[in-house]
Image (cartoon, helix red, strand yellow):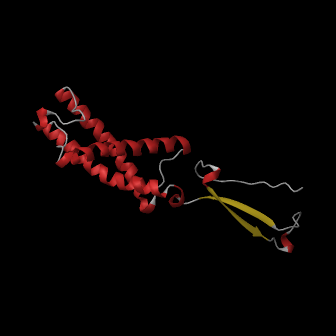
């Protein structure tokens, strides 16, 4: 029985299910053969593209992040200048968008931290590098949230709650 060995080289930690197996056969010319008298079979493992594994999740995160970060910037600017969050809007739609945006950014940062802990690197770049950009924007938004909420707390003694108050929109 012939024993086979596999050498897996990867610049970052990876799991076997995320790898795609590719087999190549090489024939060593007769004049270069020493102890090897049979063709050499080389199996390489390459990471599959992220589009096949998490394509829908990545695209949803990209779309959500590209919408959420400007909404959060608008919300933080409004909070800093008026002391209140965004107005509820027609049927509460703007307030709902504001709340969902905060949740989306926190979700992207949590996903990034989970991936960083599991693989040693953050989220993949995604199509056109947009997922990496959204990841970076989400971290920047989180820092901005902490700064503006901290300033609001020290200046006003509290931060506004998730529901509209009479003092802001009464």
| Residue 61: x %, y % from top left | 40, 52
Q: Is residue 72 left or right of residue 121?
A: left
In the image, farthest residue toward the bottom: 30
Residue 132 rendering spot, x and y as whole percentages: 42, 53
Q: Is residue 104 visible?
A: yes
Q: Is residue 55 left or right of residue 25?
A: left
The quadrant the C terminus occupies is top left
Q: Is residue 162 above or below residue 139?
A: above
Q: Position of residue 96 (x, y in %)?
A: 26, 45
Front residue of this view, candidates 54 and 32: 54
Q: Quadrant of residue 160?
A: top left
Residue nearer the viewer, 131 or 36: 131
Seen at 62% across and 49% down, the residue is 15
Q: Is residue 125 visible?
A: no
Q: Residue 89: percent from the left, percent from the top?
A: 17, 47
Question: Measured along the vertical axis of the image, is residue 119 above or below residue 24?
Answer: above
Give above or below for 52 relative to 113. Answer: below
> Residue drawn at (40%, 46%), measured in percent from left and top?
108
Q: Residue at x 46, y 41 (%)?
A: 113
* Residue 62, image quadrant: bottom left
Residue farthest top in this picture:
157
How many numbered circles does the render carry?
0
The residue furthest left is 170
User: What quarter of the picture does the N terminus occupy?
Assistant: bottom right
């Amino acid at each position: 029985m012939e024993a086979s060995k596999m050498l897996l080289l990867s610049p970052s930690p990876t799991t076997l299910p995320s790898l795609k197996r590719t087999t190549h056969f090489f024939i060593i010319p007769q004049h270069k053969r020493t102890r090897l008298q049979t063709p050499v079979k080389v199996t390489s493992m390459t990471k599959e593209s992220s589009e096949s594994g998490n394509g829908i999740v990545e695209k949803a995160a990209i779309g959500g992040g590209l919408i959420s970060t400007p909404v959060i910037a608008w919300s933080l600017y409004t909070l800093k200048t008026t002391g209140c969050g965004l107005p509820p809007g027609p049927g509460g739609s703007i307030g709902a968008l504001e709340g969902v945006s905060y949740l989306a950014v926190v979700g992207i940062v949590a996903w990034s931290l989970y991936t960083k802990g599991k693989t040693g690197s953050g989220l993949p770049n995604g199509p056109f590098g947009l997922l990496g950009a959204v990841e970076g924007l989400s971290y920047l938004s989180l820092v901005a949230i902490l700064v503006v909420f901290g300033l609001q707390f020290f200046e006003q003694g509290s931060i506004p709650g998730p529901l509209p108050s009479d003092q802001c929109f009464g």
